[in-house]
């Protein structure tokens, strides 16, 4: 009788196996919690932000952290196994992410070596995984070689920043980030010869991470209310409206993006991934800004940031819709739906400049509410064929 193998070699998953639907595993969700804890640490300075400098620092640190997560997610999508080595790989990543979280506060300043050193260790481990995959899967070897070369050059720059003078560090880590971002785009032609990335597990993994990030934003709103020692009607109204904004973001993402896979070719898939990076960042920023508005200790810039984040969220969702696969019975319009989101974004964008408190929150919620109303309208007015109508009736 055959037994399960204790230690398994990587094998390339294929789209035709998607009928089995590999679900997101509990240990992957556990890892995602580590990532969100690190994100919370990186975002903490935004509570006291007075300008775009703090936002830029957050994006730089967030980019390093999230691109490490994206790299592992892609590796898991391609080569996940059921052996013990899968848990060893994920636990090793948890250690690296924990280091980035521990040194995340002022990670590009006082804690540079701790934060960037943790990032380098985690990314080098990813490079070793690509080498392992390339050694055992000849079909994937051209991608592995490109990844090792490109990410390796980025790591040389990042590692060099650990010993460089302070004024040279930003240029070196900036160069490393450029390699991080452009490397996947250099293998588009090669990727077309590989089995397609799953249109089930991959969207599910990113959707669940979106849910966790939204949950952190909601937790920030609740914390903002709890930190206010004089809670009255005004504070409760601001908290309720902030939660409505959070609900709106959840509704719009999962109604228009989360329920649909990306188009079945490499370029739309990569655009889909890059858009998720921006989406997660603006959700985090929105959550921080909303918590400050609820707490009543808002700086003018943080209040303005809330509206700008919601505006960016709507634009990103609109662009998302252009790279999503459309089934024959898709109820949303391929042009009207994204245009509606982009056209409504300025309403949220100006909210922090023309209003404050509850009025600002109400104005920010309006463009989200319009998307929710549009989604409900097209869904419930859609003509169904007899078989589907019979199915829904039961």
Image (cartoon, helix red, strand yellow):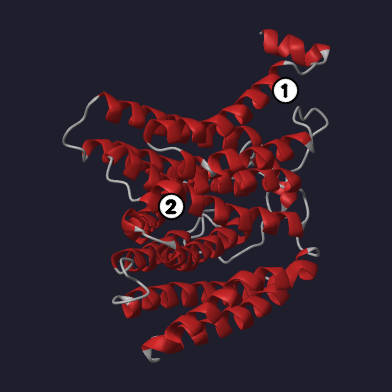
Nearest the camera: 182 or 152? 182
Q: Using the image, determine if residue 145 lies above or below residue 3.
A: below
Quick check: 362 left or right of 194? left
| Residue 195 is at least partly visible in this image | no
Residue sitting farthest toward the front: 354
In the rendered view of the protein, which quadrant contains the C terminus?
A: top right
Residue 151 on image: x %, y %: 58, 78
Q: Which one is in front in this view, the residue at disc 2 or the one at disc 1?
A: 1
Residue matched to label 1:
378
Q: Is residue 97 left or right of residue 7?
A: left
Q: Quadrant of residue 142?
A: bottom right
- Residue 154 horizontal side relative to residue 340, left or right: left
Instruction: Give the distance between the C-alpha atoms of the residues marked 2 and 1, in whole angstroms.
Output: 34 Å
- In the depicted view, which residue is nearer to us: 385 or 317? 317
Q: From the viewer's perspective, is residue 248 above or below residue 148?
A: above
Q: Give the vertical position of 134 relative to 283 (above or below).
A: below
* Residues at marks 2 and 1 touching, judged by CB atoms closer than 8 Å: no
- Residue at (75, 12) in percent of width and height: 389
The residue at the point 48 percent across, 80 percent down is: 173
Q: Residue at x 45, y 63 (%)?
A: 52
Residue 149 versus residue 333 in the image, above or below: below
- Residue at 79 percent across and 16 percent down: it is 384
Identify the residue position indicated by label 2 in the image: 32
The disc, 2 or 1, on the residue closer to the chain's N-terminal end is 2
User: SS class of the residue under badge 1?
Assistant: helix
84 relative to 335 in the view: left or right: left
Q: Can residue 108 be seen by looking at this rendering?
A: yes
Q: Position of residue 269 (x, y in %)?
A: 70, 55
From the top left corner, tell me how far across and down residue 243 is, in percent: 40, 32
Q: Quadrant of residue 12?
A: bottom right
Task: Estimate how packed mark 2 is, as few (under 14), some (14 to 19) or many (20 or more) residues with alpha carbons within 10 Å.
Answer: many
Q: In the orientation shown, which residue stands out farthest toward the left?
A: 229
């Amino acid at each position: 009788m055959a037994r399960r193998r204790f230690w398994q070699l990587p094998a390339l998953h294929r789209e035709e196996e998607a009928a089995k639907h590999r679900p997101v595993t509990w240990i992957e969700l556990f890892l995602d919690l580590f990532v969100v804890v690190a994100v919370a640490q990186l975002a903490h300075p935004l509570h006291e932000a007075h300008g775009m400098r703090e936002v830029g620092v957050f994006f730089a640190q967030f980019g390093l952290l999230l691109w490490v997560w994206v790299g592992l997610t892609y590796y898991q999508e391609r080569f996940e196994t059921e052996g013990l080595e899968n848990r060893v790989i994920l636990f090793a990543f948890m250690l690296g992410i924990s280091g980035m979280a521990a040194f995340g506060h002022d990670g590009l300043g006082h804690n540079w070596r701790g934060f960037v050193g943790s990032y380098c260790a985690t990314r080098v481990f990813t490079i070793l995984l690509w080498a392992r995959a390339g050694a055992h899967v000849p079909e994937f070897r051209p991608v592995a070689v490109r990844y090792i070369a490109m990410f390796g050059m980025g790591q040389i720059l990042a590692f060099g920043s650990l010993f460089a003078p302070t004024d040279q560090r930003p240029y070196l880590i900036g160069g490393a980030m450029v390699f991080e971002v452009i490397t996947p785009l250099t293998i588009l032609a090669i990727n077309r010869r590989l089995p397609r990335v799953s249109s089930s597990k991959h969207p599910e993994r990113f959707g669940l991470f979106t849910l966790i990030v939204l949950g952190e934003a909601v937790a920030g709103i609740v914390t903002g209310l709890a930190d206010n020692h004089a809670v009255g009607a005004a504070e409760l109204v601001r908290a309720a409206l902030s939660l409505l904004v959070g609900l709106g973001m959840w509704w719009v993402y999962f109604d228009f993006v989360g329920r649909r896979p990306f188009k079945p070719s490499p370029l739309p898939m990569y655009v889909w991934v890059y858009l998720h990076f921006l989406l997660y960042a603006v959700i985090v920023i929105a959550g921080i800004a909303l918590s400050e508005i609820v707490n009543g200790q808002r700086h003018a810039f943080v209040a303005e940031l809330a509206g700008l984040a919601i505006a960016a969220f709507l634009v990103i969702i609109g662009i998302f819709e252009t790279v999503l696969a459309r089934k024959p019975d898709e109820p949303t319009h391929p042009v009207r739906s994204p245009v509606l989101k982009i056209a409504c974004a300025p309403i949220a964008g100006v909210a922090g400049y023309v209003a404050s408190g509850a009025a600002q929150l109400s104005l920010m919620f309006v463009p989200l509410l319009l998307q929710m109303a549009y989604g409900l309208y097209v869904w419930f007015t859609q003509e169904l064929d007899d078989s589907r109508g019979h199915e829904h009736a039961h």
